[in-house]
Amino acid sequence: MGNREMTPANWAIKGELFLNCSCELFCPCVVSLGAHPPTEGHCHAWMAIAIDEGNYEGEDLSGLNVGLLVDIPGRMGEGNWRVGAYVDERANDTAYNGLLQIFSGAAGGTTGLFTMLVSEIIGAERAPVEIIRDGKKRAIKIGRKISGEIEMIEGAKPDHPVMISNSKYWMGPDIIAAIGIKSKVRDYGRVWDFGGKSAEICPIDWRGAA
């Protein structure tokens, strides 16, 4: 991902982030803001980012998808994350490089904390990042490397899933609780299965610091 020293840029992303991780229960990192240990002592996860509207230094990012493989050895807030990035193969060179700047933290703003939390970028590549958002279900497929499906946890009112609202979590204030249905990661020497594990869905409205 190149130089990860922060160089603030003009960028903005609106859309949705969803993920599936190795925690048994709803991720304790959300309410503790990364201070509480994951339920298994480590956090293995994939993340999917669907960009509904976005730009980087004037380059349109709308409609593009990004996938992340995330390997965190302990508390989220203590850093030492190892991350692999998969950028939508439809992205042109400017959009591709801009997205890598955003998700490495180098572009500053909402994701700027990644420059402190991510110790190693284990890989970055263009890939066929397919994202499906269908009612209460979300899915991501990146070739044979990541295949995940999650579903919102039904609340007392069928049209209102279980969620945390008004949080100070970095992703966004409102986090919908979900559960992994079928979820496998096979890349960078990682072989993970998150079926039945914690998942979450978050509307995002991120922007740069410039």
Image: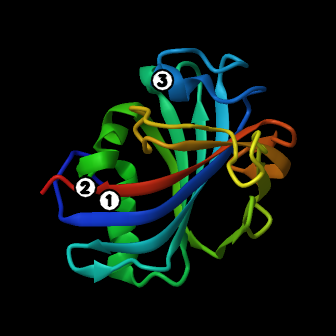
Quickly name the residue at label 3.
Answer: 34
| Dots 3, 2 in contact, CB < 8 A | no
Give the quadrant of residue 135: bottom right
Q: Amino acid at mark 3?
A: Gly
Query: What residue is drawn where x is 39% and y is 61%?
Result: 100
Q: Secondary structure at mark 3?
A: loop
Quickly name the residue at label 1.
Answer: 101
What is the C-alpha distance between the residues marked 3 and 1? 23 Å
Dot label at residue 107: 2
Q: Secondary structure at mark 1?
A: helix
Q: Is residue 1 visible?
A: no
Circle 1: is it few (<14), some (14-19), or many (20+) Cα within 10 Å?
Answer: many
**Could you tell which of marks 3 and 1 lies nearer the N-terminus?**
3
Q: Position of residue 151 (x, y in %)?
A: 78, 52
Q: Quadrant of the N terminus?
A: bottom left
Give the quadrant of residue 145: bottom right
Q: Position of residue 171 (x, y in %)?
A: 44, 44
The residue lying toward the viewer, choosing from 164 and 2, is: 164
| Dots 3, 1 in contact, CB < 8 A | no
What is the C-alpha distance between the residues marked 2 and 1? 5 Å
Q: Nearer the viewer, mark 3 or mark 1?
A: 3
Left or right of 10, for residue 204:
right
- 181 relative to 173, above or below: below
Residue extending furthest front? 157
Query: What residue is drawn where x is 78% and y is 51%?
Result: 158
| Dots 2, 1 in contact, CB < 8 A | yes
